[in-house]
Image: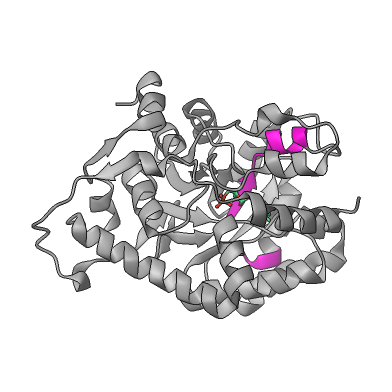
Amino acid sequence: MTRAKRKLEHIQYALTTGQKRRSGFDDIAFVHQSLPELSMSDIHLNTTIGELSLSSPIFINAMTGGGGENTKEINQKLAVSAREANVAIAVGSQMAAIKDKSERSTYEIVRKENPNGVIFANLGSEATVAQAEMAVEMVEADALQIHLNVVQELTMPEGDRDFKGALDRIQHIASALPIPVFVKETGFGISQETAIKLASAGAAGIDVGGFGGTNFAEIENERRQRKLHYFNDWGIPTAAAIVEASRTNSQLSILGSGGIQHAGDIVKALALGADAAGMAGFILKVLTDEGEEGLIKELNFIQEDMKMLMCSLGAANIPSLQKASMIISGNTYHWLSQRGFN
Ligand code: FNR
């Protein structure tokens, strides 16, 4: 099967399997504050990740790497939506364009449509320093995402089987690039143990890419004859992964993602310790159902809704939201207490 066909199948399956709400956000309840002493106009959404200042903590997460004209059109619409809603955007894996120059325009369109926006380049952990530099140059990136996706590769019949040397390569890339490197999962979550290793390798941030939203084990299982069912429920749910990754005693920025569908999820991700929140599958679904105009509206509504939620918590900014009181129940409570995170 060609890479382009596989990528298009990913998009189709992501739309049907992605949105089951198993990320743990429904286990979190905020303690309401009746005297916020705030006006809505006092509330600001700006945040910092690595050394990047963002006017909004929301970003469109990596999708659509290397699928020819179809994915180029999706990338163009995502780039315009990011520009209009003033949110950052990550492109999908650029390895396709590093191996085949005719694919470059699929990614370059994102910078062309969004000349002043914050854009993240994206490659897997098999990348070399030279490939990372090419990916950054291709979209004039403000940061590089390096994705880790062992379970997806294992579930993919034609996937990689050798995962040695990834941390060393990440370390070389992080020390060679002049921009922040964010290491991300793709729906299986990042543990405290992994986050500590990534911090010492020089990652500026971790995108936890938690379990509970788009599920690449299910997607790949749909595509294979002999199913690896045991991977369908595998992974650290996003709410727990945010806490795991933020306990490293380092300056790591935390990007919360995996199954985020609305402002309520984003505000919970930030309150659990994230500095920004990414959405992939939900964005793709809105774009498919409601088009570019619909996506821009949705992204603007989400930012308005976040301000209302923050007002109800008496939080005028993200650092104050990160101190909000909450009650954690269910699986997330059990996960965090058994891991010793109180
Ligand atoms: C992805 N994702 C992804 N991640 C990455 O780092 N590089 C990539 O090329 C892709 N490609 C991709 C394609 C499609 C169609 C989807 C839906 C997703 C993973 C994505 O960035 C994110 O980590 C996961 O999808 C979990 O977040 P959501 O979808 O639950 O918000």
Q: How is the image coloured?
A: one colour
Q: Residue at x 64, y 69 (%)?
A: 288
In terms of image quadrants, where is residue 235? top right
In terms of image quadrants, where is residue 330? top left
In terms of image quadrants, where is residue 338? top left
The x, y position of residue 14, in whole percent, is 67, 53
Q: Is residue 282 left or right of residue 1?
A: left
Return the residue nearer the eye: 251 or 295: 295
Image quarter where the C terminus lies is: top left
The x, y position of residue 310, in whole percent, is 25, 59
Whether residue 201 is visible: yes
Q: Residue at x 60, y 76 (%)?
A: 291
**From which residue to which does the magenta span run?**
138-155
Whether residue 127 is visible: no
Q: Residue at x 45, y 53 (%)?
A: 277
Tell me if residue 298 is in the magenta stretch: no
In the image, residue 291 sits, relative to residue 285, either above or below, namely below
In the image, residue 118 sits, relative to residue 7, either above or below, namely below
In the rendered picture of this protein, how many numbered marks are placed on residues?
Answer: 0
The x, y position of residue 216, in whole percent, is 68, 43
The x, y position of residue 290, in whole percent, is 58, 74
Q: Residue at x 69, y 50 (%)?
A: 123
Q: Is residue 15 left or right of residue 180?
A: right
Q: Is residue 51 left or right of residue 126?
A: left
Return the residue nearer the eye: 240 or 200: 240
